Image (cartoon, rainbow, N blue to C red):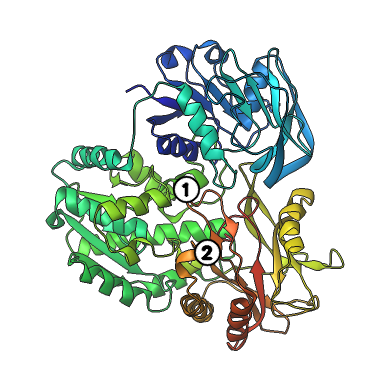
Amino acid sequence: MKSIVILDFGGQYAHLIARRVREAGAFSEIREAGTPADELKDVAGLILSGGPASVSDSDAPKGDSKILELDVPILGICYGHQWMTQELGGKVKPGKTKEYGKVEVEIQADEPAHSVSGGTLLNIGYPSFPVWMSHGDEVIEMPKDFWCTASSGDCGIAAMEDTEKRIYGLQFHPEVKHTTGGDKIIEYFVRECDAERWSVEDYEKSITEEIEKQVGDRKVFMLVSGGVDSTVAFTLLDKVIGADRVQGLLVDTGLMRKNEVKNTKEALAKIGFDNLHVEDASELFFERLDGVYEPERKREIIGNAFLEVQAEVAKELKLDGPEWLLGQGTIYPDTIETGGTKHSDKIKTHHNRVEEVQKMIEAGRVIEPLKDLYKDEVRELGEILGLPHDLVWRHPFPGPGLGVRILCADEADVGRKTSDIGSLLPIKSVGVQGDGRTYRHALAVFSDNPCEVTEELWKQSADIPNKNQEINRVLKCTSHAEPVEYKFTPGFINRERADLLREADNIVYEEMHSANLYEGIWQFPVVLLPFGASEGQQSIVLRPIESIDAMTANSAHLPEKVLKQMTDRILSLDGIDVVFYDLTSKPPGTIEWE
């Protein structure tokens, strides 16, 4: 099948690019960056992805330079843009300002005509428009025969083209929804290519064939959480191989939301699932997490405990043996954030990607029918499979549950005052900048009206992490008007902290529904921090998210009245005396704090 091939230089968005191409109606596939040109001579077009490395690094991923001589359209994005610039004789150097998040670019005038749009590839109808940047290096000198099509305040060559050879370079990411007109830019590029057609309906047909081939005459022991991913995967497996060959397992880790186990069991039973076993393993999880503070270690423990419980239940129910495969609702962000492609940086290890699972995958003992899909594609597939709307559009909930929303530390880290408007929190969180993992502080901002977030503050929330290497998040304190002198309490995950976060999370859930905001917000993590304004007290972070695919995200703008109601109710909980509102986009912050 003639396709548009994405060469993966390790960017977090490689599969997102592939999906955007599919949305434009063309078949796409992903291959390693170093794929030889001889193996690509029959493709419809090439897209060179971004990546976490610098092109000047000795171990930076390289492509075959002969691909640039192929007579097919080529689009370089971010690192791909920089790599092909170097290969074609241009120059790349570290930028004076690293750009992360939304940046305004301006179209350059007096450009030659382009065959697709009657102008540049960027002919989307705006003289200037916001784009999504995530880079430290930049092109400072274009190769011969290229002309600059766009620039930003800090990046002189934000886009370039060689019209005759149909080679295009973009420093920004057109594949993310936050780039205005990015879908049109990719659509224009796709028009240049002669590729096969693709749709989600086609994917259902192909994955059905793949499931039948992989499973053969075996059976599947499916790990179910009640979220959309595992439910769609469970439904798909039931449909393809039959419910009599699929056994679902819902593990109560003690880290679920309030009434989550009961509600999940009832929801699945209502739509006809009677092949679900529920196992209460909460004591085991709390025991294993006792005294553990490091985020990656927590994820590994939770992931391995899942497998241990799965193995014990399988033995009890006589579901072990070579005739059984382990089923998971893994989707692509889980894979790429764990460093699942050759050159990608590890952002965090997902519980369904711990070492033991990886070994099982290599041994052919795991089936993951959704592993190449993003959240919105999973939802679309769920609708195609006939699942109820409320179940398909439930807010995502991480596999490790509240375990990654209860931050742990045995001692305070910094927490010093940094400016007149805020202070660093005495704990770090995970972020993502330039396709790489960061572990940095959040800056808390204060004002006389704690629940008001001004447009200027929203702008600052994007600017501050770009200009300060200590910071990857900006928060607004909604409980205090003046900076707080934090009182740190060493803490790890236990039932008491889990119960406290469960109550705060439930308050947020109730207030979202009361204000009719639930379906307008993609996800709403509620995070517990081990410090407060008084001894023994803790803090809550509100993290409402707008996203489509989890690869990029904006902080959702909550109405002041709703924010105050949530804050007041959370402050009424025994043990909480500070509340924050996370204003950070992804990048530079991840959706979850760990």
Q: Residue at x 25, y 68 (%)?
A: 268
Q: Secondary structure at mark 2?
A: helix
* Residue, disc 1: 333
Badge 2 local density, few (<14 within 10 Å), some, or many (20+)? Answer: many
Image quarter (top left, top right, bottom left or bottom right) of the N terminus? top left
Where does the image place residue 538, in percent across and percent down from the top left?
64, 79
Q: Which mark is residue 404?
A: 2
For the residues labelled 1 and 2, the Cα–Cα distance comes to 16 Å
Residue 236: percent from left, percent from top: 24, 51
Q: In percent of the image, x 52 and y 48: which residue is there?
A: 551
Q: Which mark is residue 2?
A: none
Q: Is residue 54 above or below residue 411?
A: above
The image quarter containing residue 204 is top left
- In this view of the protein, which residue sits in the foreground, 440 or 586? 586
Residue placed furthest toward the right: 420
Q: Kindly state the secondary structure of the residue where label 1 is placed.
A: helix
Q: Kindly report which numbered mark, 1 or 2, lies closer to the viewer in this rendering.
A: 1
